[in-house]
């Protein structure tokens, strides 16, 4: 049973988790398991520097821990330390050649050539039994990246398909579930016209959109402004709705159930609790960015609870978006990303996203909800950046054009890309793949999106 105590724990979780992580790291310096727990807590709260320091301490305690070396490499990438991250992955593989995550990470970072590649090892490991499909996913992606580096897109796509098929057979994307969730979320638009009872805080800027649409880029542009900080990818608002509705019902939390009951929540309390829950990641500057892909579903409730918050929804060309998602490995334990294992499913996800974006654009105030085109942003960087800052109530600052010089950590798959100047390399990439994208193209065409 969920109670108000559980909700308050969530509100205080970042502050408490950081405090506990620091205490654990300090008082249990020779305990590798305690250090691992501390490192995970630092990572969850966006404290990547201390997560890295703790992983380095663990390396001293147990130099033969391959998984720790992999996790160290991940954090080093987030911090922009790509050279040392590569070395961490290499060390992880030296200790355990079966570490498929480290092997994939290394192939992802280093251009493969016909003379220097890991095809033999990758293929041999791929042929081994894999009941849950995770190892196949990583190895298939590594082989796909290898053949893409060879400019053999047919072979690359064949390996992507092989790697994803095993996982997709175990937990396929459910169109009906996706549409049911979207229906419930869009129904939360009821009563938006009376949205003046929530928290009056204007601190939050919510950035949303499907993964690989440019949301991290927008986060970096905004957080390069001296009046804006980034909270990273936190899902506090979603969890607060789920827990608060469960506490009201006296039942277990659940997203769909929470949404159906959300109309009964006190919006002022929800908004205030949300802002409080982001501390200490926020509060040091006038505004903060909270970026989460699925917030495009929650825009109605966000506006009810925080009517002065800005919501920036990033859109991208449908076929480029399907391709980019299909080529990406997402968190393997999150059902939200199941669509990325099948091209037709990815297209259906794009359809549901467009449905939601159009719904909110029609119903939310234009000075609170904005759809920003990735293509427009790339092709008119300064003009679109000026429009973005004006929408967010921020004065112009040249630093927003130099977002790639932002030294802050990036805890997403875009960690390398957003440290480069803006370029148009990702626009129209789908054209290289031709008929390989037909499963997605057919679904998108039937929906009138291409």
Image (spheres, rainbow, N blue to C red):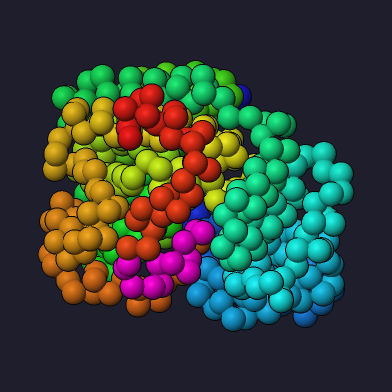
Residue 391 shows up from this direction: yes
> What main secondary structure does the magenta stretch of the protein show?
loop
Instruction: Name the residue: 67% across, 49% down.
Output: 159
Instruction: State the residue in front, 268 or 434.
Output: 434
Magenta stretch contains residue 415:
yes
Instruction: Name the residue: 24% across, 48% down.
Output: 372
Q: Is residue 306 left or right of residue 82?
A: left
- Compared to residue 329, the image places residue 169 above or below, namely above
Instruction: State the residue in front, 238 or 275.
Output: 238
Picture coordinates of residue 406, whole percent (x, y): 36, 74
Residue 285 shows up from this direction: no
- Compared to residue 344, the image places residue 117 above or below, namely below
- Compared to residue 222, the image places residue 404 above or below, namely below
Q: Is residue 225 left or right of residue 404?
A: left
> Which region is colored magenta?
412-423
The image shows a total of numbered marks equal to 0
- Compared to residue 396, the image places residue 246 above or below, namely above
């Amino acid at each position: 049973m969920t109670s108000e105590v559980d909700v308050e724990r969530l509100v205080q979780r970042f502050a408490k988790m950081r405090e506990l992580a620091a205490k654990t790291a300090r008082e249990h310096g020779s305990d590798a398991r305690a250090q691992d727990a501390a490192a995970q807590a630092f990572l969850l709260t966006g404290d990547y520097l201390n997560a890295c320091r703790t992983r380095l301490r663990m390396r001293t305690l147990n130099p033969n821990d391959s998984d720790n070396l992999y996790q160290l490499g991940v954090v080093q990438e987030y911090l922009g330390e790509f050279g040392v991250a590569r070395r961490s992955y290499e060390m992880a593989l030296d200790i355990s050649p079966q570490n498929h995550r480290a092997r994939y990470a290394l192939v992802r970072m280093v251009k493969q050539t016909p003379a220097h590649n890991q095809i033999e090892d990758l293929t041999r490991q791929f042929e081994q039994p894999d009941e849950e499909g995770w190892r196949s996913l990583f190895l298939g992606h590594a082989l796909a990246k290898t053949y893409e580096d060879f400019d053999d897109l047919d072979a690359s796509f064949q390996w992507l398909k092989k790697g994803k098929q095993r996982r997709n057979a175990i937990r396929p994307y459910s169109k009906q579930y996706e549409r049911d969730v979207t229906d419930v979320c869009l129904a939360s638009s009821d009563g938006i016209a009376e949205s003046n009872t929530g928290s009056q805080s204007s601190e939050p800027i919510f950035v949303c959109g499907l993964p690989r649409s440019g949301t991290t880029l927008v986060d970096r542009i905004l957080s390069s402004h001296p009046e804006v900080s980034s909270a990273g990818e936190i899902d506090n608002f979603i969890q607060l709705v789920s827990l608060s509705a469960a506490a009201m019902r006296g039942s277990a939390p659940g997203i769909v159930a929470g949404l159906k009951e959300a109309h009964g929540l006190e919006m002022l309390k929800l908004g205030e609790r949300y802002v409080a829950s982001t501390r200490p990641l926020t509060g040091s500057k006038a505004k903060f960015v909270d970026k989460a892909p699925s917030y495009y579903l929650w825009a109605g409730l966000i506006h009810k609870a925080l009517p002065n918050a800005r919501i920036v929804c990033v859109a991208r060309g449908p076929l480029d978006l399907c391709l980019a998602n299909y080529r990406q490995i997402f968190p393997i334990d999150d059902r939200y990303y199941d669509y990325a294992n099948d091209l037709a499913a990815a297209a259906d996800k794009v359809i549901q996203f467009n449905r939601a974006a159009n719904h909110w654009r029609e119903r939310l105030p234009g000075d609170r909800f904005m759809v920003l085109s990735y293509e427009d942003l790339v092709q008119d960087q300064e003009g679109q950046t000026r429009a973005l800052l004006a929408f967010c109530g921020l004065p112009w600052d040249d630093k927003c054009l130099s977002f790639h010089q932002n030294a802050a950590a990036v805890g997403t798959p875009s960690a390398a890309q957003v440290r480069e100047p803006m370029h148009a390399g990702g626009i129209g990439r789908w054209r290289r793949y031709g008929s390989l994208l037909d499963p997605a193209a057919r679904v998108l065409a039937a929906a009138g999106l291409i």
